[in-house]
């Protein structure tokens, strides 16, 4: 019974943490400057890193990491500037005001991420 309860509590913790991971990192649309849609419309932005250490730094402060990513050359790690490894990735949820802005951010994230507040 104890083992079952332990597994249940672990699954609940991981379930809740993954639910919060999808929350947008911003409250203002980076395209139009409007408030993020109340229905939590988000654009998914994938960021690639050179190593787990840089990925961890990004995950600790996603908003600051996205601004670094916006200013980083393609194929370079936004934290260290070294070449990226395809297996080291994080996905950030960027709040937007509408479906049109979602398409714009996902099509060209670096253009809009510098404006994320």
Image (cartoon, rainbow, N blue to C red):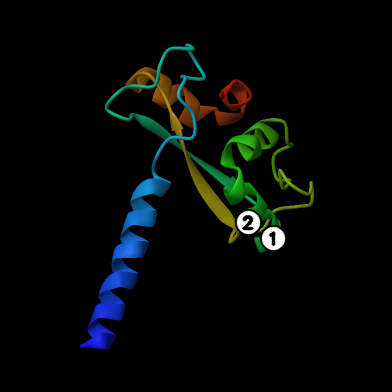
Q: Secondary structure at mark 1?
A: helix
Identify which residue, 27 or 41, lies in the foreground: 27
Q: Is 4 situated above or below 24?
A: below
In the drawing, does residue 114 fall left or right of residue 80? left
Categorize mark 1 by other alpha carbons within 10 Å: few (<14), some (14-19), many (20+): few
How far is the residue under mark 2 from the one under mark 1? 5 Å
Q: Secondary structure at mark 2?
A: helix
Can you say which quadrant of the picture contains the N terminus? bottom left
Residue at 64% of width from left, 24% of height from top? 114
Identify which residue, 17 or 110, lies in the foreground: 17
Residue under label 2: 56
Residue under label 1: 53
Can you say which quadrant of the picture contains the C terminus? top right
Q: Position of residue 27 (x, y in %)?
A: 45, 24
Q: Position of residue 79 (x, y in %)?
A: 73, 46
Q: Residue furthest left?
A: 1
Residue at 34% of width from left, 19% of height from top? 98
Q: Is there a contact, CB below 8 Å, between mark 2 and mark 1?
A: yes
Identify which residue, 35 or 76, lies in the foreground: 35
Residue at 72% of width from left, 31% of height from top? 71
């Amino acid at each position: 019974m104890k083992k079952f309860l332990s597994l249940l509590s672990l699954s609940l913790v991981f379930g809740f943490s993954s639910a919060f991971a999808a929350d947008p990192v911003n409250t203002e649309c980076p395209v139009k400057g409007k408030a993020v849609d109340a229905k939590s419309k988000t654009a998914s932005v994938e960021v690639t890193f050179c190593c787990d250490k840089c990925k961890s730094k990004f995950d600790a402060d996603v908003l600051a990491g996205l601004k670094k990513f916006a200013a980083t050359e393609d194929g370079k790690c936004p934290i260290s500037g070294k070449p990226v490894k395809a297996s080291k990735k994080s996905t950030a949820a960027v709040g937007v005001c509408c479906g049109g802005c979602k398409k714009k951010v996902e099509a060209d994230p670096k253009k809009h991420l510098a404006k994320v507040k």
